[in-house]
């Protein structure tokens, strides 16, 4: 098991956002986290990476407890995180956005380099000298994901990678997730249930800060009753 999240409770001030979330990922899996607005999807990812440290419970990554560590240390232990708002550097070129994120973990193989990313993902390679600010939303998202690869992550956390993107770009992000899932374990959130199930093997559904359902993506796709109960917008 690469990620073992045990009964985490996370608060914003006195307001409790996660009421004991438990989930597990085996190495190599691609898993989606579903739930209506405010269910706790983003907070779960932020709790794993340490931006909103859980007040109780455990986060075990690669056999080691990581809860309570600062985000940069958790990232350096091998977790890549792409927040909802992307946050690329607008005044740096595409190439420099990748360069500044490079970090070599001790003992890790260098799978991703700036050059092989620019070569593999043409959309970025064609724009390597362009400033981040001049990229479209979809290109910025590609860059944000590519940048997270520069730490050679063993686990990638993607928060709503399709937020605000046009349908044609959504398809490209889907292809990117499929491609990365060949080499990396991925946990991602998405409001688009159909998209999420198409690009994952398993799903967890959150409601009011708790996991209320888990299934394979194929099972959940066929299970209209569960989708309506926990995911449809009334
Ligand atoms: N910075 C914050 N301060 C206070 N409460 C917050 C903050 N961020 C989120 N919350 C609350 O925590 C709960 C979980 O929010 P979270 O963003 O994790 O949900 P989500 O499932 O990711 O929803 P969305 O799809 O809207 O992002 C919600 O009740 C939300 O209002």
Image: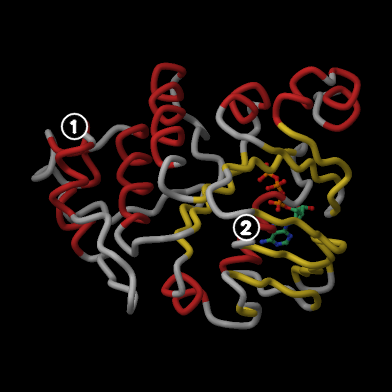
Depth order, front residue of 149/70: 149
Please state the horizontal and vertical placement of residue 43, each as a whole percent of the image.
68, 58
- Element assignment for label 2: helix
In percent of the image, x 20 and y 56: which residue is there? 113
In percent of the image, x 33 and y 70: which residue is there? 108
Disc on the earlier residue, 1 or 2 = 2
Where residue 91 sits, quadrant-wise, is: bottom left
In percent of the image, x 76 and y 46: which residue is there? 38
Q: Mark 1 vs ligand 1: CB under 8 Å?
A: no
In percent of the image, x 87 and y 49: which residue is there? 208
* Lateral position of residue 67 relative to residue 213, left or right: left
173, above or below 97, in the image: above
* Lateral position of residue 107 relative to residue 12, left or right: left
Q: How many marks?
A: 2
135, above or below 42, in the image: above
Where residue 177 sits, quadrant-wise, is: top left
**Are there few (<14), some (14-19), or many (20+) residues within 10 Å of tag 2?**
many
**Which residue, given by chain and number where applicable, does mark 1 sit on?**
122
Quadrant where the N terminus lies? Answer: bottom right
- Element assignment for label 1: helix
Q: Residue 45 — which label?
A: 2
Q: What is the distance, in whole Å, between disc 1 and disc 2 at their CAs?
A: 29 Å
Depth order, front residue of 65/208: 65
Quadrant where the C terminus lies? Answer: top right
């Amino acid at each position: 098991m690469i990620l073992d999240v045990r009964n985490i409770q996370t608060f914003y001030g006195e307001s409790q956002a996660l009421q004991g979330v438990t989930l597990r990922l085996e190495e190599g899996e691609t898993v989606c986290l579903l739930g209506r607005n405010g269910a706790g999807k983003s907070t779960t990812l932020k709790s794993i990476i340490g931006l909103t440290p859980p007040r109780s419970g455990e986060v075990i990554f690669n056999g080691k407890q990581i809860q309570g560590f600062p985000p940069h240390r958790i990232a350096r232990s091998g977790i890549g995180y792409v927040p909802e708002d992307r946050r690329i550097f607008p005044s740096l070129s595409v190439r420099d956005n990748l360069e500044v994120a490079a970090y070599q973990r001790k003992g890790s193989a260098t799978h991703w380099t700036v050059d092989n990313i620019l070569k593999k993902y043409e959309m970025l390679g064609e724009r390597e000298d362009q400033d981040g600010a001049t990229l479209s939303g979809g290109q910025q998202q590609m860059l944000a994901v590519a940048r997270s690869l520069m730490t050679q992550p063993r686990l990638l956390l993607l928060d709503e990678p399709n937020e605000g993107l046009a349908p044609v770009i959504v398809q490209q992000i889907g292809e990117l997730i499929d491609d990365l899932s060949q080499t990396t374990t991925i946990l991602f959130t998405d409001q688009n249930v159909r998209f999420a199930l198409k690009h994952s093997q398993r799903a967890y559904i959150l409601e009011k800060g708790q996991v209320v359902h888990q299934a394979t993506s194929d099972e959940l796709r066929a299970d209209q009753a569960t989708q309506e109960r926990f995911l449809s917008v009334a």
